[in-house]
Image: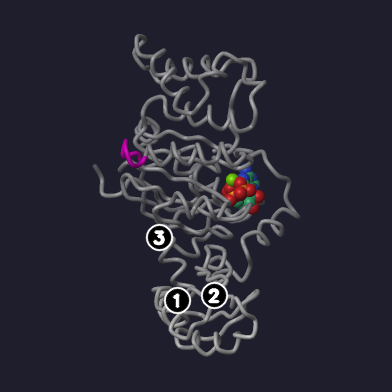
Amino acid sequence: MPEHAIEAQDLVRVFKKGPRAVDGIDLAVAPGEIYGFLGPNGAGKSTTVLMLTTLLPPTAGTAWVGGFDVVREGPQVRSIIGAALQEAALDPLLTGREHLRLQATLQALPRDVRSKRADELLRRVGLTEAADRKVKGYSGGMKRRLDLALALVHSPRILFLDEPTTGLDIQSRTALWQEVERLAREDGVTVFLTTQYLEEADVLADRVGIIDHGKIVAEGTTDELKASVGRPTVEAVPADPDDRERFEAILAGFGDPCGAERGVAVRLRSSEADLAGIVRALDAEHLKVEQLQLHQPSLDDVFLAKTGRTLEGAAEEEDEGRPRGGLAMEPA
Ligand SMILES: Nc1ncnc2c1ncn2[C@@H]1O[C@H](COP(=O)(O)OP(=O)(O)OP(=O)(O)O)[C@@H](O)[C@H]1O
Ligand SMILES: [Mg+2]
């Protein structure tokens, strides 16, 4: 097995009359890792996925998937990857089960295992009951789940998921997260997942790359990224408002005062939160606490620190000049 499941070096994609959609990306994803590619609309996520899955040739740079060059060894790459792209290509007139059987045939699975594999995957993505209904009657979430099942038919070692949970309700989202987590932890599948959701990257990804305007602006584990932008803050709300000044005096021993919504807050001196120490110090002065809260910096704080915008603000700004949906492919 190659050292990296996915590797890109200075990967670039320029669209004719378009932007530098991907502007020199380097990345390395370890086997079995869940890599979250987080960025606002138009950041270059799908374009990167299309290049890594051999569906779009890079303008410059190189990438290897499973050790195979995405340009020179396309068929080998395609044989070991599964992909659920942003626009699922489903036939509204086929049922879920028919889709899976068709995919199993296309992937040349032996005839005697096709039905069993279809049943197993339908169960895993929670579509057993809907299996024999036509896809035109499926909800958006059911289509996403079917698309994931289709990507898994040939048991790929490396899985690409482009915004797999956009538009899903919380239950479907959680179910999909669990399945992705299971694939990585139990089956050792490497997962490259794009998302616009901070929470998704936070919960699911072992490592996150934040992409904006075609460039990776930050990369690391979520803890590393958060620690890079600042230390956590602690806010204590006095049970008795008259104790406010005494709270301020005690908390000042742990960090530097900063703005708070209701109570008294400090930015901690160390990145290790000493909540127990704060409780003991307040207790020693017989001060009663109504609420004590730790605020860790969020991935949005990271995005803000690197780009000067918040992720949500960036999405709105990009949306203004750009029709949503529909990834038109340019001929190679
Ligand atoms: N086929 C194309 N022709 C011209 N420009 C394109 C094409 N596909 C994408 N782009 C442009 O490249 C940039 C990156 O697009 P891309 O689809 O990769 O973004 P994304 O991060 O996937 O966004 P979203 O979250 O909205 O899916 C955008 O400015 C987009 O308009
Ligand atoms: Mg996209």
* Residue that badge 2 annotates: 289
Point out residue 116 in the picture as x, y percentages from the top left corner: 39, 15
Q: CA distance from mark 3 to mark 1?
A: 30 Å
Left or right of 267 in this view: 107:
left
Q: Is residue 82 above or below residue 27?
A: above
Residue density around tag 1, few if under 14, some if 14–19, many if 20 or more, within 10 Å: some
Magenta region: which residues?
184-189
Q: Amino acid at mark 1?
A: Val
Which label belongs to residue 279? 1
Earlier residue among tags 3 and 2:
3
Instruction: Give the position of the C terminus as an image quadrant.
Output: top right
Q: Secondary structure at mark 3?
A: loop
Point out residue 325 in the picture as x, y percentages from the top left corner: 68, 41
Q: Nearer the viewer, residue 99 or 50?
A: 99
Is the CB of mark 2 within 8 Å of ligand 1? no
Left or right of 292 in this view: 16:
right
Q: Name the quadrant containing residue 26.
A: bottom left
